[in-house]
Amino acid sequence: MVVSTQPRFYLASEQHVDHLVQLDTLAQRDPKREEDIKAWVEARNCYLCESDGEVVGYGVLTRSFFGHAFIEMVMISEKRRRSSLGTALVSYFQALSQGSKLFTSTNTSNLPMQYLLLKTAFKPSGYIENLDPDDPELIFFYTDAGDAHASCSGPNEYAASSSHK
């Protein structure tokens, strides 16, 4: 689906929690995610992504990564994925974090998110094993200082070079 209007981003409030739980693919099978969503909204870290007058996703931006900005979550409803909304949300977080370091992470198995991050000028910054069985967490870094372009051509190259060293 093509986005027909520019997406709009704004802080979520308590009234949005039920809708976020409905569009979050993990929350429907894991009650802890609903608790996470409530906590993110309460802490004022959860931003809605609205397109064509409908909330179609959300993202979470914290300062929880060693005092640096960290994109903890990017979730776009299944029916609106691959329509540039995730890219727009990440770009919004980059603008909010202008002048400071911005980090995020994704699993090795999540190739669409890795491509999105590389496309938005994040670069690989390491990995953490043992969070999810057999699926290391890849760390990515962005800075608007001009030196954040990834040196690898895609997620498979990075995953292959970093796994199980």
Image: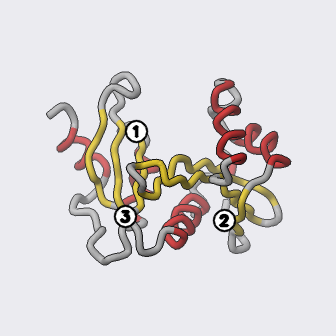
Asked if residue 54 lies left or right of residue 33, the reply is: right
**Element type where label 2 sits in the image:** loop
Mark 3 → mark 1, Cα distance in angstroms:
17 Å
Position above or below: 125 against 8: above
> As rendered, which of 62 and 134 lies closer to the eye?
62
* Residue 26 visible in the current orientation: yes
Picture coordinates of residue 130 (x, y %)?
33, 25
Q: Quadrant of the C terminus?
A: top left
Q: Amino acid at mark 3?
A: Tyr
- The answer to which of marks 3 and 1 sits earlier in the sequence is 1
Q: Are marks 2 and 3 in contact (CB under 8 Å)?
A: no
Give the residue number, with chain letter if any, for mark 2.
2
Q: Amino acid at mark 2?
A: Val
Asked if residue 119 lies left or right of residue 150, the reply is: right
The residue sitting at the front extreme is 67
Q: Are marks 1 and 2 in contact (CB under 8 Å)?
A: no
> As rendered, which of 136 and 110 lies closer to the eye?
136
- The answer to which of marks 1 and 2 sits earlier in the sequence is 2
**Element type where label 3 sits in the image:** strand
Mark 2 → mark 3, Cα distance in angstroms:
27 Å
> As rendered, which of 161 and 142 lies closer to the eye?
142
Mark 1 → mark 2, Cα distance in angstroms:
27 Å
Q: Quadrant of the N terminus?
A: bottom right
Asked if residue 134 lies left or right of residue 9, the reply is: left
**Residue at 34% over, 47% down:** 139
Q: Are marks 3 and 1 in contact (CB under 8 Å)?
A: no
**Residue at 30% over, 30% down:** 129
Give the residue number, with chain letter if any, for mark 3.
142
Give the residue number, with chain letter if any, for mark 1.
107
